[in-house]
Image (cartoon, grey):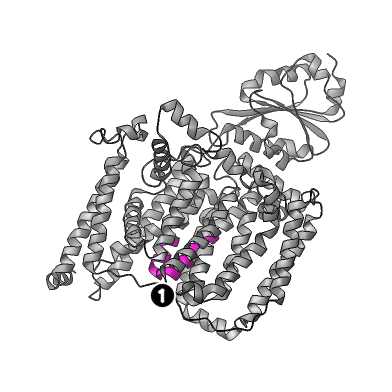
Amino acid sequence: MAGPIFEVFTRNRQKFRSYILLIDGVGLAIAAQLTLAHATLQPEFWDMSTWLTNLGKNTSPMLGLILYAFAGLIFVVALHTWGERPVPFVIPTDNPKSRKPRFGLWITSLGLAGVTAFYAANSTELSYSLSFGIVSCISISLFAFSVLYDEKWLPPSVRQTKTWISTHIAELLLVLIILVAAFLIRFVNLELNPYSFINDEGEMGKNGVCILQGTCLEIMETGWSQQPRLAFLPTGLSVSLLGTTALAVRLPSALIGTLAILAVYLFSREVFDKRTAWVAASILAALPVHVHFSRLGVDNIMDSLTTALILWLLFRGIKRSSTISFLAAGIIGGLCFYTYPGSRLAPAIGLFIFGYLCLRTRDVLKAQRRNFLVYFLALAITAAPILGFFVSHVQDFSARMNSVGIFANSAFQNEMTTYNKSAFEVITGQVMKSSLVYIATDAPSNFYNSPKPYLVPLLAIFFMLGLANTLWRIKDPRYLALFVWFWAAIILGSAFTAGPPSSQRMLASVSALAIITAIGISKTVGFLPQTGKFIRWLAPLSLLIIVLITCYQNISFYFIDYQVNHYFEDPTNELTYETRTFIAPLHTNGRFFLIGEPTVPYLSFMNFDFFSPDVEKAYFNEVTPQTLAALPNDKDALFIATSTRAADLEIIAQLIPGGEWNEVRRRYQPEDVLFYSYKIDKQLLQSYKP
């Protein structure tokens, strides 16, 4: 093998220089990663005023970042010296074929959408919003039909489908393997990992059930956390099939997370190449932060799907002059307004990229004006009802940013005043805390609680090299889209909110993260010689080894280290989850009384209502013979005490003996008691006299 490699070096000195530069760049990137990994995360690490003076002490991030900057510069120079030229993204600018206008259905669908928006904006009684939701579906269908009819679209025949499958069978099998593996990573032992079932998941389940029971049919309103009602529909459908279980609430996230991997593959394949696509999909399939939120029953994971899907459809539409792709992108963009608030960023990024293309490339707007109109109208028609509601309920639209945004809740001003910092220092610190979590720092709290960065060191190195290449190619709309996609989620989702890094609000960036990392890997491996019978297999073999090693590291961390060290476990969530096996069997025949710390609002947590909706619940924190006698006694009584209130429960057992006593320990930390329970039949309760 050494012979052909030496022959390549000696035949072309320019190629040899590029190899040397590559080795220098990668070596410097390794040094940068080691420097950041061994930095002392003391308060001065985040104090911008000490960054330059503490370079030698490595108590600031600057030394590692400076090394990474030089590594990235050398890397792109190596690419340039090598003569690497990406396949250009060709944008058709030919004049579109003239078509006879068919505006009848367009006007009808726009009129129906306008009616629903007007009703949602001006009505104080939204009891008929389900009917108007049906009208909205009709308006979307009419618009879609008009576009498909105008395009003379027909579904592919059976013969065409078989031919396409046979042509792409190898690629389909590879994608299927990645998706099946990704789903299994997200599905196996889903009910108990991560442990425990948090109370926000109970909120999702309860709101989903509320829709299916017909008590929350005001679909033009918002529910828990000011999210539109339809955001809870997937959870409700899952619960209707699987019952009130943790598995039912978490399954939609596992499916959405798997679909996000497919969307990343489709986007990368469309705008880059197949190699980048399967590497990016493989990285995302096992990335711990994405796996984690794909296993939680909250809808934050939707952000990792929507942006990838919309950008894939838009780039596909622009590249192929496909009106159907623009139509699909517009409908999905409109649906983003009905789900997790962070997903609203996706259609905005799509509009930004299209605007950039119009400014950068002549005649794009002229060539794509009808397609852009289809995208915009599809988005507006789909989102019309909820946008009408937000017009008169602006506080609901901006509720999340108002509650967590540092500018809206005075956190920004307080930081400046308390620590005597300038506005620039505060913002810079927020950005650094939000971005360094990808490669260097831990991710405390915010639904994740990881002691490690999002990326293992090897992937962190390739990500930073890929980011350097992205900046080098920033004029290319594909790389600009990646750059904006990655940083917009970080800035708006975390840097401008309290308590960075906000892992749950940066999930849109994780899909872009996988693609940028895959680009770094692909560009590096592309330096390997392609001559010789054996050597030509060196590049794909190297890619496979890198993917397998990093996937193993990620899976090992999340499914072994993360669980063994109990990073996600919390006694309060565990109590509200584990007590379900005692409370739910009571149904309407019993009451549940909680003896706990008065400072913790246990009964306001939705897990109790989700798992046992028909059981009466109340606090019983003052335990005396008199208060016990005053309790209603026409039903069985279940008393549950937290581990610190065992003595109070023992008093009840002494006053009314004969009940059923249970001691429940923490599932994965059995050395600690989680709670005690004592159940009393109504006959015993009725016979008690103080």
Question: Taking the image as drawn, is residue 540 in sight?
Answer: yes
Q: Determine which quarter of the picture holds residue 98.
A: bottom right
Q: In which quadrant of the rendered image does the N terminus lie?
A: bottom left
Report the residue at 74% width, 17% height from top.
623
Report the residue at 51% width, 72% height from top.
317
Q: Secondary structure at mark 1?
A: loop
Q: Which residues are magenta?
A: 258-281
Q: Determine which quarter of the picture holds residue 105.
A: bottom right
The residue where tag 1 is placed is: 90
Residue 258, position in %: x, y? Answer: 54, 59
Mark 1, other Cα within 10 Å: few <14 / some 14–19 / many ≥20: few
Report the residue at 69% width, 67% height from top.
140
How many marks do you count on the picture? 1
The magenta stretch spans residue 476: no
Report the residue at 31% width, 42% height from top.
36
Residue 609, position in %: x, y? Answer: 73, 39
Kind of residue at disc 1: Val
Q: Is residue 326 left or right of residue 31?
A: right
- Residue at the far left in the pictured view: 10
The magenta stretch spans residue 264: yes
Q: Is residue 227 above or below residue 571?
A: below
